[in-house]
Image (spheres, coloured by chain):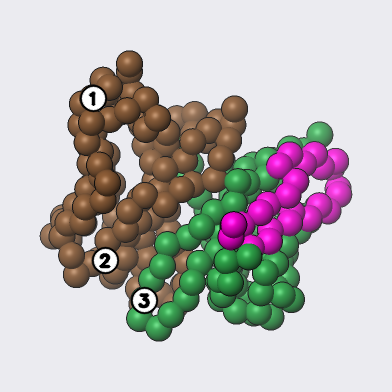
Chain colours: A brown, B green
Amino acid sequence: GESVGLHLPTLSVQEGDNSIINCAYSNSASDYFIWYKQESGKGPQFIIDIRSNMDKRQGQRVTVLLNKTVKHLSLQIAATQPGDSAVYFCAENIRDTGRRALTFGSGTRLQVQP
Amino acid sequence: DGGITQSPKYLFRKEGQNVTLSCEQNLNHDAMYWYRQDPGQGLRLIYYSQIVNDFQKGDIAEGYSVSREKKESFPLTVTSAQKNPTAFYLCASSRTGTGHNYGYTFGSGTRLTVV
């Protein structure tokens, strides 16, 4: 399969545990954030998004938390399953730059142990 | 089913050659994007297009060119000026709208290797 990150930080969890993946962003003008999941050899898949006027958003088994004070974003996955093993990226839309495209973080590899 | 298709999945380029990566979408999205992915790094923006016949350079546009003659298509040419083209290339598309942001739909990627 395709290697999408040889030197990525890795989070290893046991099946059934909750996972928390963190992302720090640097631009206080960012107004929209997305989490993506990328499996080996595939394109990223949308998981959940959040706008800067919110602190928390929940989906199916996933929750995104946004702390604008410390410019921190987290993705919580409940009852982690082997199928959750992948690389997870956060992405942000930086307002006020004229750039109309998302900026991606470097990613975190999640390994789920059976 | 609507989606975004990249082809080919694997591509081999000889030194000094130009190659073109295809990206087609039937999602009726106005915006399309090209990103490059290298091991140990996130996605880096090459070019993007918000509307037909218009496109903008991203962070690493040198050695690449694009066109947007049709809404559905956004091909990327990797020219001989790109000195290190071996990478995984991802195309994406999204809706656009004043005051709103929308997530991307990604293709499955093209792995380009220089031989």
Q: Looking at the rendering, in which quadrant would you find the C terminus of chain B? A: top right
Q: Position of residue A86 (x, y in %)?
A: 42, 33
* A89 left or right of B110 in image: left
- Between disc 3 and disc 1, the foreground one is 1
Q: Position of residue A75 (x, y in %)?
A: 26, 45
Secondary element at image label 1: loop
Numbered disc total: 3
Identify the magenta region.
Answer: B1-25
Output the chain of dot 1.
A
Q: Residue at x 43, y 80 (%)?
A: B97
* B20 left or right of A55 in image: right
Foreground pick, B15 / A17: A17
Quadrant for residue A28, please give it. Answer: bottom left
Secondary element at image label 3: loop
> What residue is pinned by disc 2?
A51
Residue type pointed to by label 1: Gly
How packed is label 3: few (under 14 Cα within 10 Å), some, or many (20 or more)?
few
Q: What is the number of the mark on residue A16?
A: 1
Foreground pick, B85 / A78: A78
Q: Looking at the rendering, in which quadrant would you find the N terminus of chain B? A: bottom right
Give yes or no for contact between labels 2 and 3 (Cβ–Cβ under 8 Å): no
Secondary structure predominantly adopted by residues drawn in magenta? strand
Residue type pointed to by label 3: His
How packed is label 2: few (under 14 Cα within 10 Å), some, or many (20 or more)?
some
